[in-house]
Image (spheres, grey):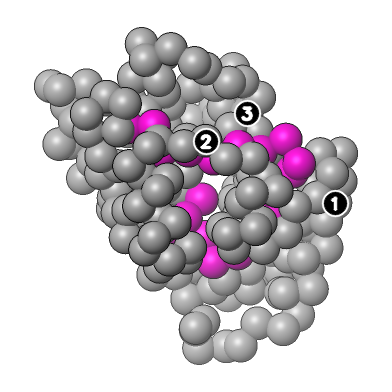
């Protein structure tokens, strides 16, 4: 397993943690490992809910750094898009609810991963953006469609066309996330949500 991805099972909840400190891209190896782990979780009868928590802490403002973050490379962009998109589809098709917890910066691939979750909690430090438009490209993992489904076509186009970065409160206002909590309470509140949800999970699938 890649060092930045860890998971454990407690009280019928599978906790998958992705550590991107210092901020680094979601590379192909991590995507493949995440897809494998999520499929294992979905097959585990002792798990009713999955939690994906993403930890990062840095903001970048230059195109050169953003290019590295979104892992865009012309020589491997097609392969990377295929692998990342496959992982997002694995998460979306899971029969068990997936709760996402975001602490810090969610841009590019991390934002697309967050959009694959059924429910989202973020800390008051979280920020969200698809900055790809500044590099004359578009999100390639299905994030454009999922964003429209969640926040509506008009708001989605605004975020995609301008590459606007929004904070946690704005994300809450446009229904991108389900809850915004203080940074120091994110882990505890996510755990409470997950354990409560695990007791209410309907066998046979989710909505």
Task: Kindly identify which residue carries mark 3.
Answer: 56
Q: Residue at x 66, y 56 (%)?
A: 172
Q: Using the rendered image of the protein, determine whether residue 144 is visible from the camera's viewpoint.
A: yes
Q: Secondary structure at mark 2?
A: loop
Q: Earlier in the sequence, mark 1 or mark 2?
A: 2
When asked about the image quadrant of residue 62, the answer is: top left
The residues bearing labels 1 and 3 have C-alpha atoms spaced at a distance of 18 Å
Q: Earlier in the sequence, mark 3 or mark 2?
A: 3
Measured as percent of width and height from the top left, residue 25 is found at: 43, 26
Task: Kindly identify which residue carries mark 2.
Answer: 165
- Between 148 and 97, which is closer to the camera in this rendering? 148
Q: Nearer the viewer, mark 1 or mark 2?
A: 2
| Local crowd size for mark 2, using a 10 Å CA cut-off: few (<14), some (14–19), many (≥20) | some
- The residue range painted magenta reads 114-132
206 on left or right of 183: left
Q: Residue at x 43, y 66 (%)?
A: 152
Q: Secondary structure at mark 1?
A: helix
188 on left or right of 77: right
Q: Nearer the viewer, mark 3 or mark 2?
A: 2
Task: Kindly identify which residue carries mark 1.
Answer: 188
Q: Secondary structure at mark 3?
A: loop
| Local crowd size for mark 1, using a 10 Å CA cut-off: few (<14), some (14–19), many (≥20) | few
Q: Residue at x 48, y 63 (%)?
A: 151
When asked about the image quadrant of residue 84, the answer is: top left
Measured as percent of width and height from the top left, residue 76 is found at: 17, 27
Image position of 147 with respect to 66: above or below? below
Q: Residue at x 58, y 32 (%)?
A: 105
Image position of 167 with respect to 152: above or below? above
The residues bearing labels 3 and 2 have C-alpha atoms spaced at a distance of 16 Å
Q: Earlier in the sequence, mark 1 or mark 3?
A: 3
């Amino acid at each position: 397993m890649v060092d930045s991805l860890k998971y454990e099972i407690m009280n019928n909840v599978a906790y998958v943690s992705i550590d991107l400190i210092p901020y680094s891209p979601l590379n192909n190896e991590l995507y493949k490992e995440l897809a494998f782990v999520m499929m294992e979780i979905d097959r585990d009868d002792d798990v009713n809910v999955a939690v994906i928590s993403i930890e990062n802490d840095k903001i970048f403002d230059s195109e050169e750094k953003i290019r590295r973050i979104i892992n865009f490379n012309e020589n491997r962009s097609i392969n990377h898009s295929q692998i990342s998109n496959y992982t997002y589809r694995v998460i979306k098709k899971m029969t068990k609810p997936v709760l996402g917890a975001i602490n810090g910066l969610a841009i590019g691939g991390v934002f697309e991963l967050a959009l694959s979750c059924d429910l989202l909690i973020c800390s008051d430090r979280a920020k969200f953006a698809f900055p790809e438009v500044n590099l004359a490209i578009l999100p390639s993992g299905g994030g454009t469609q999922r964003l429209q489904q969640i926040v509506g076509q008009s708001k989605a186009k605004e975020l995609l066309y301008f590459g606007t970065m929004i904070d946690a409160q704005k994300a809450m206002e446009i229904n991108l996330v389900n809850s915004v909590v203080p940074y120091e309470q994110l882990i505890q509140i996510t755990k409470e949500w997950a354990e409560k949800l695990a007791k209410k999970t309907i066998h046979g699938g989710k909505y």
